[in-house]
Amino acid sequence: MTESLQAAPGPYFGDFGGTFVPEALMAALDELSDAYDKARIDPEFTRELDRLARDYTGRPSIVTEVPRFAAHAGGARVILKREDLNHTGSHKINNVLGQALLTKRIGKTRVIAETGAGQHGVASATAAALMGLECTVYMGEEDTRRQALNVARMRLLGAEVIPVTTGSRTLKDAINEAYRDWVANVETTNYLFGTAAGPHPFPAMVRDFQRVIGVEARAQLLELGGLPDAVVACVGGGSNAIGVFDAFLDDASVRLIGCEAAGHGVETGEHAATLTAGRPGVLHGSRSYILQDQDGQTIESTSISAGLDYPGVGPEHAFLHSIGRAEYRPITDAQAMDAFRLLCRTEGILPAIESAHALAGALDLGRELGPDATILVNLSGRGDKDVETAARWFDLLEEDA
Amino acid sequence: MSLVTARLDEAAAAGRAALIGYLPVGYPDVETSARAMVAMVEEGCDLIEVGMPYSDPVLDGPTIQQAAEAALRGGVRVSDVFTAVRAVADAGAPAVVMSYYNPMLQYGLERFAADLAAAGGAGVILPDLTPEVAGDWLAAAKAHGLDSIFLTALSSTPERLHITAAASSGFVYAASIMGTTGGTPVSDAAERLVADTRAAGAARVCVGLGITTGEQARKVGAYADGVIVGSAFVRQLLDHEGEAGIEALRAKTRELASGVRSAR
């Protein structure tokens, strides 16, 4: 019997993962790791998390078949897992509720978070408000402009939002700044890491908090007639993708496809397609693929989607890529925006631009697989936050409006 | 005995702590940064930390970030580190490289160790690497006779102090504050950390972070084997252009050197 790939405990996933951090953070990471190992098997913790998922997030999220959209995908059957319908509008809430509960268990009173599109920041601010924790969110200055609405949402929820003006002023620099805060305030503060990357225990822990997506979707698809031929998700750091993939890892017949942001095109060098065009290295606490120059300096990524605009990727994706269990494809800004508009117009669903990368991947895949195929797409978030970006892209705004 | 320990012991024999000065290579340019390091040796630095600028320096505060970002924009390469190391070694001081892990990893750990040793370098300080994941580097360093200097922090558990003391050679770098370079001033807790790190088996413990004045250097020099200063030196180069920067750096070095010399 082959060994199961599901719910791998870390710290290593093949050659990837690990704990590459300053000594100052080691005690906190050890503490967090121990606390999580106890919590995950503590019925009281899992019961509370399940209760929040049901009564606060609104789980299980539904699945929606989208035939009018699928007509453009070679006639394949396309089914969306609706994480966009979660409270706060994306899959990010699944993770932060788990980490915020854990924060209370270890007796810390303050949380910090990094955010790109603002979805994780909003989710963190939400969980902090719910549980009475102080919350500071670091966001690249460039992203605070792209996602001004989410900045206001976080502040309404009582969080402090700090625009980060160092480096490329995007997600990677927000992570750097959050690390600096954590080193200085580790006694009172827990870091709610937003994606399945970073040092152990984050990649495994965030995956565990997100795996509910795939567990639900697999059961829902079986009820609808059987396992899908492929599961498609967008990959920045990769938490929604690993969340939907995990339950399918041992289903050999199910292809797992991650869609990376190809920005202006991988060939232009202006993209965020880490697994497509990067190579292994160490960034933000773990060994994975990185967009980097010859000297190991991180290269700034480019994507219309702030949530995918990250030059790294979670180590479990690097592992699944290395063993060929998952495939990773680049999707350009233009492909993603076409799919974005198509879903709006054919199904009346406004997706996050991040998720639109997965939709674009599904369009290609459907044409490859043909009308007999069933494709599950993780619709990781809703697009309300992206209306302004999309309106500019499609030139929908009145002059002087 | 390594170049680093020999120099620390010389200072100890003279009844004082050593002064260890940090500058990033490539700011304002490679040639000037190397000359600036030599100037620090001439004015009383016992050892030099040659910093490799990195795109994601999570332990550095705004001062060093600013200089490192400028150096990267100027095109500094990993190989430039060895130019500076050679200049420092020729000036008669042990040179240790301070580098985040990924630039070393991408250069090739074995190749990095070989080139550093060939340039006359004495060792490496590893701010974002802990002994548990440093096996490949430790093997390369050992093969080339280089010291590997790990950090202890105020948050380190007794068990971790032992792991770090056992894995370090040259000295152990005790980070005096929980924070980044050039931030909060050194705290009294540093003295306890030095004592705890020694009790965990470290023969030599130097203190860095938060030391910017001769007075602070005097206080820390009373109990540490070495006093490490970075941002205060970098600040001189940021605030003064060209030769005026080197002159300001010389004056700052004299201030700190006299601090460690009046400590005991």
Image (cartoon, coloured by chain):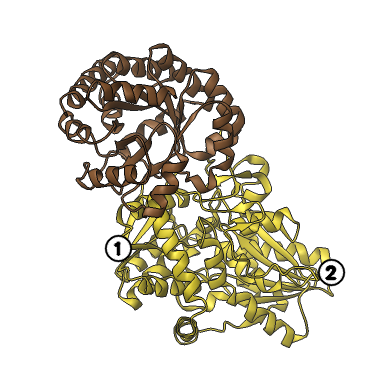
Chain colours: A yellow, B brown
Image quarter of residue A129: bottom left
Residue A353 location in percent, x, y?
56, 62
Question: Where does the N terminus of chain A fall, quadrant-wise?
Answer: bottom right
State which tag comes first along the sequence, 1 or 2.
Answer: 1
Is the residue B141 above or below the residue A273 in the image? Answer: above
Q: Residue at x 47, y 65 (%)?
A: A33
Marks counted in the figure total: 2
Residue A370 is tagged as 2
Residue B131 is tagged as none
Q: Mark 2 falls within which chain?
A: A
The kind of residue tagged 1 is: Thr
Q: Which of B135 and A235 is in front in this view?
A: B135
Find numbered disc 1 in the image and state the secondary structure of the residue it sits on: loop
Q: Do callouts 1 and 2 mark residues in contact (Cβ within 8 Å)? A: no
Q: Distance between the residues labelled 1 and 2?
A: 54 Å
- State whether residue A167 appears in this view: no
How crowded pointer 1 is (Cα within 10 Å; few <14, some 14-19, many 20+) is rated as some
Q: Nearer the viewer, residue A96 or B104?
A: B104
Residue tagged 1: A188
Residue A6 location in percent, x, y?
67, 70
